[in-house]
Image: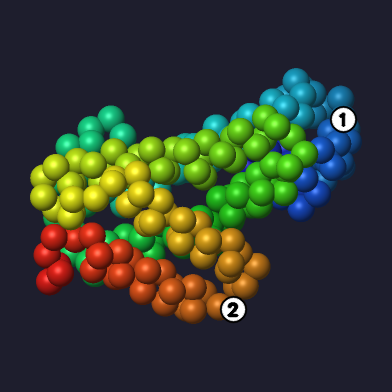
Amino acid sequence: MGTKERIMEEALNLFSTRGYEGTSVKNIAEAVGIKDSSLYKHYKSKKEIFDTIVQEMSSRMAHMSQTLGLPDETDMEQAARVYGNLTTDGLINLSRQIFLFYLKDAFASRFRRMLTIEQYRTRDIYEVYRKIFMEDSITYQTALFAQMTRWGVLRDADPAAMAMNFYAPVFFLLNKYDQEPGREEEALGELKRHVREFARIYARSEER
């Protein structure tokens, strides 16, 4: 890991424990083991470090989706086809992998904690938190469920309400078990029950 990457890593460590406002450039430089002046050779400001962390998280999220074979928002018909072909057990397994990424991945979990801590103090960071963990997820799932409803995979219901009903419990479980590493199986059990119940309520075929 080069100095630029080490700076980003140590900044994320500090941001996820002290908060963005509670961390200075000097704190980051000390954590890396370099002088402030050396840090500025790699980043112009603390804000640029934060922006780089956000970009890195976006890249990791995209890589995770690609690894799992998930279509993006540019082709909702393809996305609906992929999800529509999943059995309930398949959806449970997929949900489990995505949930564990946000719960346990070293970068993703620190990123989420950083935004959670700082959202009440810094408006710009709140906007990032809102966009990534609320708006983007709900927008994507609303469009996905609308397409799946049109194709008859899901029952005729409000797609925005369906998206909220699916996503909100998952988001709740992430927060509930964020600081409970020894209760992972309990968390996954709750997730499984949630996904199965969602399928029972909304899927056209209860035998899926």
Estimate the spatial distance between the alpha carbons at disc 2 and disc 1, rounded to whole Å.
Answer: 39 Å
Q: Which label sits on residue 182?
A: 2
Relative side of 170 to 95, left or right: right
Q: Which badge, 2 or 1, comes first in the chain's sequence?
A: 1
Seen from the viewer's position, the closer of residues 133 and 35 is: 133
The residue at the far front in this view is 157
Side of 72 where 44 appears, left or right: right
Q: Position of residue 153 (x, y in %)?
A: 14, 53
Kindly identify the amino acid type of the residue bearing the numbered disc 2: Gly
Q: Quadrant of the C terminus?
A: bottom left
Q: Quadrant of the N terminus?
A: top right
Disc 2 vs disc 1: Cβ atoms closer than 8 Å? no
The quadrant holding residue 106 is bottom right
Circle on res. 36: 1
Tell me which residue sits at (47%, 78%) in the image.
185
**SS state under label 2:** helix
Q: Which mark is residue 89?
A: none
* Mark 2 burial class by Cα count in 10 Å: few <14, some 14-19, many 20+: few
Find residue 152 and report its horizontal and vertical position in percent. 11, 50
Asked whether, in this view, residue 164 is left or right of residue 36, the answer is left
Residue name at image x 43 percent, y 74 percent? 190
Asked whether 164 or 175 is in front, the reply is 164
Up/down of 94 relative to 162, above or below: below
Mark 2 against mark 1, which lies toward the viewer?
A: 2
Q: Residue at x 37, y 69 (%)?
A: 194
Q: Residues within 10 Å of mark 1 (few under 14, many from 20)?
A: some
Q: Quadrant of residue 50?
A: top right
Instruction: Look at label 1 and name its amino acid.
Output: Asp
Residue 159 picture location, percent across and down = 29, 45
Please indicate whether residue 30 sits to the left or right of residue 53 in the image.
right
Q: Is residue 29 visible?
A: no
